[in-house]
Image (tube, rainbow, N blue to C red):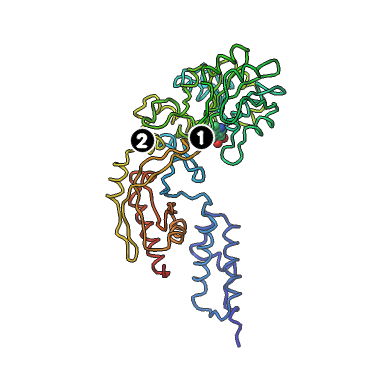
């Protein structure tokens, strides 16, 4: 008996095969050798292989292995959940302008250089003027995210001192951002004011004193207290804080720049509204309602921002150059509210009428193979990202019935371009609000392929 494994080509022979130099150029020699070695090992383990066609099989197997290993673990998905700011899907999708700016900024750039003087400049100057122009603030600074912004503000203004926060605002946001913990880790002491449902300006007045370094107002973004509930206005709070000579910082979280950007939505604190009401510093996220990259923005009084700039923690909270570029490009769109509404995907999705979403859903609604059925139905979508809790937007979706909804969802999620949808009452729903105009056909194709697979598997 001849040993079937004898027929295997050697590594050296495989490396001389025609496609291999191209692979080496692309993936690197060590990577290619490792994939060929895995292909050889698998062939050796496989019994009864005959020698013919061996090399081409080995090469095909190595090529598939190389491709699989080169695949990014970060995959672009089609968001059919209807959740506009989906934390698990990377929150805000960037505007085209921001994506282009981010790509340009990836090379060398004047991040920390003044081209005018040729001397060292500050990365914190890049978006600052634009933020001031848009908000009317005296000064601004950008950090890596809003958690860092809040932590920096607390550390600078209340280190070893007290921070006054209403008991109704001691919130947890996104699983790991808890106001009491952030204050403690930032080196300050929390002093709770009022009660969970009602806090008055006089409660702050009674608590404010020598040990208090900061009054912190936190937007309880992701929940609502209803019924017998009250809080002082930002203006009332500003009066109390100013009277005691203590700065007032307002973490508005979701970062709606101006109140008029989302007509018809419930009231949400806006950056401009808060500054106008007298907040000394306002902090917010770049990738929530602003619709930009992950970042923390701080705007307010020049003297306080100057102190933040000198705080050593800022180095640890430093914002990346590509983020700054994307943020700047996003903010520029806000110079014209109509332009922002059209070009910032988050605003566009939130502002699209249910009729318009339904028109897009109908125009691209695919035919589905039996036993599945598809209908265009009105649904409700949410803003997400801890914004507008309890508020639902009317939307439209493809609703697929007649199969096992969870299995279908799994298939759609496993596609090369994964499609995420919603499962509702044994149906799989794809909400078109969060499918970008132009992506409807690609979405329909993924859906059809998933249904066909599910059908073939006896779904
Ligand atoms: C989202 C949020 C944060 C955290 O912001 P990140 O940008 O995710 O770090 C902090 N405060 C409030 C009120 C928020 O809504």
The residue beneath circle 1 is: 224
Residue 408 is situated, as x and y percent measured from the top left of the image, at 43, 60
Residue 12 is situated, as x and y percent measured from the top left of the image, at 59, 67
Disc 1 and disc 2 in contact, CB within 8 angstroms: no
Residue 145 visible, this angle: no
Q: Quadrant of the C terminus?
A: bottom left
Q: Is residue 55 left or right of residue 367?
A: right
Compared with 363, 266 (above or below) is above
- The residue closer to the viewer here, 100 or 409, is 409
Compared with 16, 131 (above or below) is above
Helix, strand or loop at label 2? It is: helix
Name the residue: 61% across, 19% down.
Answer: 204
Helix, strand or loop at label 1? It is: loop
Residue 226 visible, this angle: yes
Residue 141, labelled with which disc? none
Q: Residue furthest bottom?
A: 1
CA distance for labels 1 and 2: 23 Å
How packed mark 1 is, by other alpha carbons closer than 10 Å (few <14, some 14-19, many 20 or more), is few
Name the residue: 32% across, 57% down.
Answer: 374
Residue 351, labelled with which disc? 2
- The residue closer to the viewer here, 209 or 310, is 209
């Amino acid at each position: 008996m001849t040993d079937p494994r004898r027929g295997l080509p050697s590594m050296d022979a495989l490396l001389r095969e025609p496609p291999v130099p191209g692979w080496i150029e692309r993936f690197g020699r060590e990577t290619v050798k490792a994939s060929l070695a895995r292909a050889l090992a698998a062939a050796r383990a496989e019994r009864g292989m005959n020698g013919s066609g061996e090399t081409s099989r080995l090469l095909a197997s190595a090529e598939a292995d190389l491709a699989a290993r080169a695949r990014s673990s970060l995959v672009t998905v089609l968001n059919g959940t209807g959740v506009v700011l989906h934390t698990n899907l990377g929150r805000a999708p960037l505007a085209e302008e921001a994506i282009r700016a981010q790509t340009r900024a990836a090379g060398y750039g004047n991040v920390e250089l003044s081209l005018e003087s040729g001397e060292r400049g500050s990365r914190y100057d890049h978006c600052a003027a634009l933020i001031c122009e848009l908000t009317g603030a005296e000064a601004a600074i950008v950090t890596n995210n809003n958690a860092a912004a809040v932590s920096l503000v607390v550390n600078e203004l209340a280190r070893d001192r007290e921070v006054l926060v209403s008991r109704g605002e001691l919130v947890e946001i996104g699983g790991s951002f808890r106001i009491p913990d952030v204050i403690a880790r930032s080196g300050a002491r929390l002093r709770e004011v009022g009660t969970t449902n009602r806090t008055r300006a006089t409660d702050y007045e009674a608590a404010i004193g020598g040990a208090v370094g900061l009054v912190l107002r936190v937007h309880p973004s992701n929940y609502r207290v209803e019924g017998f509930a009250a809080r002082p206005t930002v203006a009332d709070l500003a009066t109390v804080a100013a009277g005691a000579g203590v700065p007032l910082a307002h973490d508005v979280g979701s970062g709606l720049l101006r109140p008029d950007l989302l007509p018809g939505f419930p009231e949400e604190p806006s950056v401009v509204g808060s500054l106008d009401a007298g907040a000394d510093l306002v902090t917010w996220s770049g990738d929530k309602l602003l619709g930009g990259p992950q970042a923390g923005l701080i705007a307010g009084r020049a003297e306080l921002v100057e102190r933040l700039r000198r705080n050593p923690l800022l180095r640890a909270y430093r914002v990346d150059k590509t983020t700054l570029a994307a943020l700047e490009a996003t903010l520029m769109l806000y110079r014209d509210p109509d332009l922002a509404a059209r070009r910032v995907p988050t605003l566009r999705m939130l502002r699209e009428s249910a009729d318009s979403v339904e028109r897009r859903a109908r125009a691209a609604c695919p035919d589905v193979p039996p036993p599945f059925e598809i209908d265009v139905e009105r649904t409700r979508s949410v803003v997400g990202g801890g914004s507008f809790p309890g508020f639902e937007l009317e939307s439209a979706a493809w609703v697929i019935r007649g199969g096992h909804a969870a299995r279908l969802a799994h298939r759609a999620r496993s596609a090369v371009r994964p499609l995420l949808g919603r499962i509702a009452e044994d149906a799989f729903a794809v909400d078109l609000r969060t499918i970008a105009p132009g992506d409807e056909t690609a979405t329909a194709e993924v859906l059809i392929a998933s249904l066909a697979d599910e059908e073939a598997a006896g779904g």
